[in-house]
């Protein structure tokens, strides 16, 4: 044991060294790329240094409000210092990329005008430009004039035949003129079907735009999506444009907006820009939220007429009383004082009962580690939901747990299954989630009745799950440890985007009855070896499970499964073995056929090994993982001393086969040093 301990320490020291040199390396790289200052990111605009004019302002919550619910106004917001877009030696226009999240809030639902434009312009002075249908960009005399040198991407909500608009909800590329050279109804092409899906610019919801220009190909792409979605692969607009005659150095970047006769507020929530690189992804958790659109309220007249015959009345009263008694038993729920503040997050049992048509077996979506899940449709909003019934015998800790669930309900990320709320009954908790029409990923990986996912989709799902997990670990206001990452906890939305579900739920079992005992919750095959020693889930134990998940997706095998000979195959060991032999690619899922990108499959397999490293200190943080996946940092080579997974095998002999295990918390004090926090 002593020898093993020393080897372990040596190895830990070595990995720390590697880690430190890696960190130094990235630090230098970052410092070098930042010196040109051609990259910037605003996750909200609080304290931002922008040049504003007209009615533009920055609200106290950090929204950039370019117009302010007033008719016939305009506003502009620019980055104060200009940028150079042209390579001085070759004269070519650089590639650039920008993304922003915006929202139009009309004063009256669905009545919005006019719109906004992202623009690149030689001047910040638009005092002579007109508002309304001129969007604060041009006036009658200079519209269409090549001397404007303006590139605009317009988001326009008014149909104007004079400028050859197609409708009152479109996106267009404008060069020196409001008559767009390329345009399309607002929307996106679904990644799975390729079909066009419209989006409503006037919905009052936040939408995101990406503008990418490839200077070499001279290709300008514009992509639109709602912020719950990943960036669609196919752009909405894609046009070859030689910008070398349009852009003259230096140029300002910013936004212009105008209203006409409909009072509308045009907001930007976040913005990033990068010259010669991909614009940094916005951090949705940091974006300020949009004000709500005031709903149009219809008056609801309710008339109830009762027959007043006295004999009949008695009968009715008796009937009503009996009905109420039955009704109260059927829909009984637990509601205590401390829950009152969670009002909006609480669903009534009656609504859930009706939504699921009484929790009928035919609406059963599945049985998970924590309980049965039913499909339902809320009667009021007609939205589809999934209701998880978690049995909870002990009342202890429920208050803390519900507080946590409610706080988790505020998490918003396109790669997390949205928790809508909860309901509590005697001995059971009901959790209400967004319904995910494509079910869980494991069905696609192992099921017979689902089609095989191609590599591009698998890669996208992996990236999505990584970004969701990064959000839980580092980007939200508190650290959320998932504790049970696995293919069956990754759900697929209607576009086959991966979304993590069930986060934080494992916590329910942490509030045990014995305060001196910590329970380890998780699933066999995904549990980091140190969990048994430390007995405490951390972000780094999540990373371990994420590594196993990567192997699962790339290999199409369960973490622990039996092979033809009847032997047990531990996926991680098997991949390590093949990696040692130089045949790591042989472990890929044979169902992928030849349609895969060798570098990507290799990246995922090696990253899987790195994440599931037996030494916690050798594992990357999720932020690093996301960088490796995005190709923004090279994956470090695995050390030849990588110990095989048989360490875990060893531990399994110590009784690793229970779903939930108890460990005394006296050993739960050791802490784990994570990668870069
Ligand atoms: C919009 O801004 C203008 C100029 O700053 C101001 O006069 C006007 O009252 C504002 N309107 C609203 C509705 O806030
Ligand atoms: C804003 O940026 C401009 C141009 O870079 C600079 O001159 C100015 O001092 C900045 N203002 C503040 C308040 O930082
Ligand atoms: C707004 O318009 C859209 C599309 O025309 C429609 O589906 C939606 O119901 C309208 N909303 C309201 C509140 O009128
Ligand atoms: C239109 O705008 C241009 C550029 O700002 C300006 O030079 C010109 O005088 C304006 N024309 C009118 C009629 O306002
Ligand atoms: C633009 O879109 C095309 C078509 O999808 C794609 O091939 C190209 O890589 C995209 N270019 C940029 C700069 O995003």
Image (cartoon, rainbow, N blue to C red):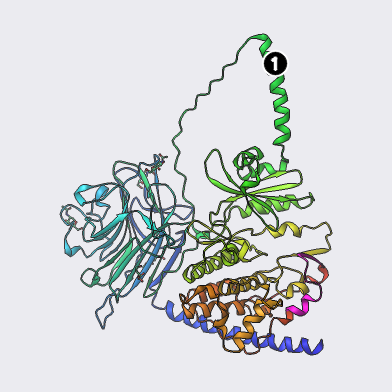
- Residue 203 on the magenta span: no
Residue 663 x, y percent position in the rendering: 81, 68
Question: Which residue in the structure is indicated by mark 1?
Answer: 315
Q: Which residues are magenta?
A: 648-663
Residue 14: name its quadrant. bottom right
Instruction: Choose top left, top right, bottom left or bottom right for residue 519.
Output: bottom right
The spot of residue 320 in percent (x, y) is: 69, 22
From the viewer's perspective, is residue 675 above or below residue 367? below
In the image, residue 232 sits, relative to residue 677, either above or below, namely above
Observer-nearest of 529 and 537: 529
Q: Is residue 201 above or below residue 315?
A: below
- Image position of 670 (left or right of 93): right
Label 1: how many Cα within 10 Å (few below 14, some 14–19, many 20+): few
- In terms of image quadrants, where is residue 244? bottom left
Quadrant assignment for ligand 2: bottom left
How many numbered marks are there? 1
Q: Is mark 1 within 8 Å of ligand 3?
A: no
Q: Nearer the viewer, residue 386 or 103?
A: 386
């Amino acid at each position: 044991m002593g020898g093993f301990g020393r080897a372990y320490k040596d190895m830990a020291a070595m990995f720390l060294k590697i880690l430190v040199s890696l960190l130094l390396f990235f630090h230098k790289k970052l410092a070098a790329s930042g010196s040109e200052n051609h990259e910037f990111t605003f996750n909200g605009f609080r304290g931002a240094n922008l040049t504003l004019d007209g009615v533009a302002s920055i609200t106290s919550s950090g929204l950039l409000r370019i117009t302010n619910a007033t008719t016939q106004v305009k506003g502009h917001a620019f980055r104060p210092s200009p940028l150079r877009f042209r390579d001085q030696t070759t004269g070519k226009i650089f590639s650039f990329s920008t993304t922003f999240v915006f929202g139009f809030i009309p004063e009256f639902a669905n009545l919005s005008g006019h719109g906004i434009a992202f623009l690149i312009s030689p001047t910040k002075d638009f005092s002579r430009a007109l508002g309304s249908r001129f969007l604060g960009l041009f006036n009658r005399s200079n519209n269409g004039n090549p001397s404007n040198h303006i590139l605009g991407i317009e988001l326009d909500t008014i149909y104007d035949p004079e400028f050859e608009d197609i409708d009152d909800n479109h996106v267009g590329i404008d060069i020196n003129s409001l008559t767009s050279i390329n345009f399309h109804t607002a929307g996106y092409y679904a990644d799975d079907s390729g079909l066009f899906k419209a989006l409503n610019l006037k919905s009052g919801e936040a939408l995101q735009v990406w503008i990418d220009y490839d200077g070499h190909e001279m290709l300008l792409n514009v992509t639109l999506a709602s912020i719950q979605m990943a960036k669609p692969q196919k752009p909405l607009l894609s046009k070859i444009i030689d910008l070398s005659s349009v852009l003259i150095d230096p140029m300002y970047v910013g936004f212009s907006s105008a209203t006409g006769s409909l009072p509308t507020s045009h907001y930007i929530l976040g913005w990033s820009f990068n010259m010669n690189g991909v614009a940094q992804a916005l951090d949705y958790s940091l974006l300020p939220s949009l004000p709500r659109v005031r709903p149009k309220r219809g008056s609801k007249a309710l008339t109830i007429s009762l027959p007043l015959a006295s004999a009949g009345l008695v009968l009715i009263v008796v009937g009503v009383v009996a009905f109420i008694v039955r009704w109260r038993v059927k829909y009984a729920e637990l509601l205590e004082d401390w829950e009152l503040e969670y009002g909006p997050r609480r669903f009534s049992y009656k609504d859930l009962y009706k939504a699921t048509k009484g929790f009928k077996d035919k609406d059963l979506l599945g049985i998970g580690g924590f309980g049965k899940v039913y499909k339902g449709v809320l009667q009021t909003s007609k939205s589809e939901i999934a209701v998880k019934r978690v049995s909870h015998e002990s009342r202890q800790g429920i208050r803390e747990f519900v507080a946590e669930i409610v706080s988790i309900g505020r998490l918003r990320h396109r790669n997390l299954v949205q928790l809508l709320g909860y309901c509590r009954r005697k001995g059971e908790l009901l959790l209400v989630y967004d319904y995910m029409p494509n079910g869980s990923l494991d069905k696609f990986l192992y099921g017979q009745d689902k089609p095989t996912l191609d590599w591009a989709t698998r890669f996208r799902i992996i990236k999505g799950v990584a970004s969701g997990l990064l959000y839980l670990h580092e980007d939200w206001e508190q650290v959320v440890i998932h504790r049970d990452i696995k293919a069956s906890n990754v759900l697929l939305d209607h576009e086959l985007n991966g979304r993590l579900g069930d986060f934080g739920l494992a916590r329910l079992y942490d509030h045990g009855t014995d305060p001196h005992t910590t329970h380890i919750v998780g699933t066999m095959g995904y549990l980091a070896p140190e969990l048994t020693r430390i007995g405490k889930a951390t972000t780094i134990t999540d990373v371990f499970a994420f590594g196993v998940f990567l192997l699962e997706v790339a290999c199409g095998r369960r973490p622990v499964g039996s092979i033809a000979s009847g032997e047990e195959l531990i996926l991680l060991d098997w991949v390590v073995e093949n990696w040692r032999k130089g045949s790591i690619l042989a472990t890929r899922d044979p169902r992928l056929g030849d349609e895969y990108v060798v570098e990507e499959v290799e990246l995922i397999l090696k990253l899987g090994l790195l994440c599931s490293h037996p030494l916690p200190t050798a594992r990357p943080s999720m932020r690093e993982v996301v960088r490796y996946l995005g190709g923004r940092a090279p994956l470090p080579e695995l050390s030849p001393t990588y110990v095989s997974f048989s360490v875990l095998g060893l531990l399994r002999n110590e009784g690793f086969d229970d779903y939930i295990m108890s460990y005394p918390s006296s050993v739960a004090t050791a802490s784990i040093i994570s990668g870069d926090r």
